[in-house]
Image: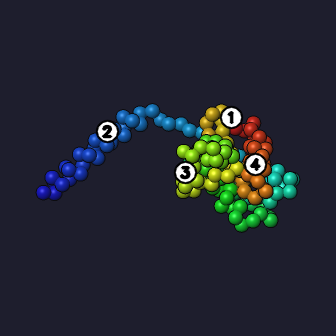
């Protein structure tokens, strides 16, 4: 009886192993956002926004959506922390600036449900970090008096490290 049970359990697992082995013949290589660049982006974004008089929080996530760096200006509101993280996650997930997503939600009823995705914040201020066409992370900023201003700070911070994104 035990042998029959073991055979019934082992057969599907062996078949799954064979499929996994043949499917993984080619090794997947991906670029990702390192901590050094993520930290530089976060600090630069706070600096750029502060120069314009905005107290913001900045979240930088890697290609998997994991928070890699975070910076918060001394006088940034408490709500900016989560807003920045969610904007970064949203931009990474869609591989597009959140301002474009915001426009699409307003114009296209089919995209209106994007706002219902857990962890998404469809407001301007999230910008993907790319090497060529490959998204390796994203920046989210919250706290300026408008998402377009958050986004401008993010773009300036990414531009500052552009030479390292190769």
Q: CA distance from mark 2 to mark 4?
A: 50 Å
Q: CA distance from mark 4 to mark 3?
A: 22 Å
The residue tagged 4 is: 148
Residue 157 shows up from this direction: no
- Asked if labels 2 and 1 touch by Cβ distance under 8 angstroms, the answer is no
Q: Position of residue 3 (x, y in %)?
A: 16, 53
Which quadrant of the figure contains the C terminus? top right
Instruction: Decide if residue 125 is in sight here.
Output: yes
Q: Report x, y in % for residue 16.
A: 31, 43
Which callout, 3 or 2, points to the residue nearer the camera?
3
Labelled pair 1, 4 in contact (Cβ < 8 Å): no
For label 3, the crowd category at 10 Å Cα-Cα, with few meaning under 14, some 14 to 19 and many 20 or more, is few
Q: Are marks 2 and 4 in contact (CB under 8 Å)?
A: no
Instruction: Give how far across and how far down residue 61 sits, in percent.
Output: 63, 50
Please give the name of the residue rendered at 39% of the width and 35% of the height, measured from the top-left corner.
Answer: 23
Given this view, does label 1 or label 4 mark the residue nearer the observer?
4
Q: Which residue is mark 3?
A: 113
Q: Residue at x 64, y 47 (%)?
A: 106
Q: Which mark is residue 18?
A: 2
**Marks 4, 3: nearer the viewer:** 3
Q: Earlier in the sequence, mark 2 or mark 4?
A: 2
Q: Secondary structure at mark 1?
A: loop
Question: Residue 124: x percent and y percent?
Answer: 70, 50
C-alpha separation, residue under disc 1 versus residue under disc 2: 37 Å
> Image quadrant for the N terminus?
bottom left
Marks 1 and 3 in Cβ contact (< 8 Å): no
**Comparing labels 1 and 3, the label whose residue is closer to the camera:** 3
Sequence order check: which comes first, mark 1 or mark 4? Answer: 4
Upstream in sequence: badge 4 or badge 3: 3
107 relative to 8 in the view: left or right: right
Residue under the point 54% across and 54% down: 117
């Amino acid at each position: 009886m035990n042998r029959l049970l073991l055979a019934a359990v082992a057969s599907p697992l062996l078949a799954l192993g064979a499929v996994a082995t043949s499917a993984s013949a080619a090794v997947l290589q991906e670029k990702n956002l390192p901590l050094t660049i993520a930290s530089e982006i976060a600090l630069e974004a706070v600096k750029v926004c502060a120069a314009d008089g905005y107290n913001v929080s900045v979240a930088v996530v890697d290609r998997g959506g994991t928070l890699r760096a975070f910076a918060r200006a001394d006088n940034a509101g408490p709500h900016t922390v989560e807003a920045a993280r969610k904007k970064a996650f949203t931009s990474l997930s869609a591989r597009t600036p959140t301002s474009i997503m915001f426009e699409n939600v307003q114009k296209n009823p089919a995209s209106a449900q994007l706002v219902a995705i857990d962890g998404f914040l469809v407001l301007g201020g999230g910008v993907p970090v790319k090497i060529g066409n490959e998204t390796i992370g994203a920046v989210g900023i919250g706290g300026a008096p408008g998402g377009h201003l958050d986004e401008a700070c993010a773009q300036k911070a990414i531009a500052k490290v552009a030479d390292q994104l190769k």
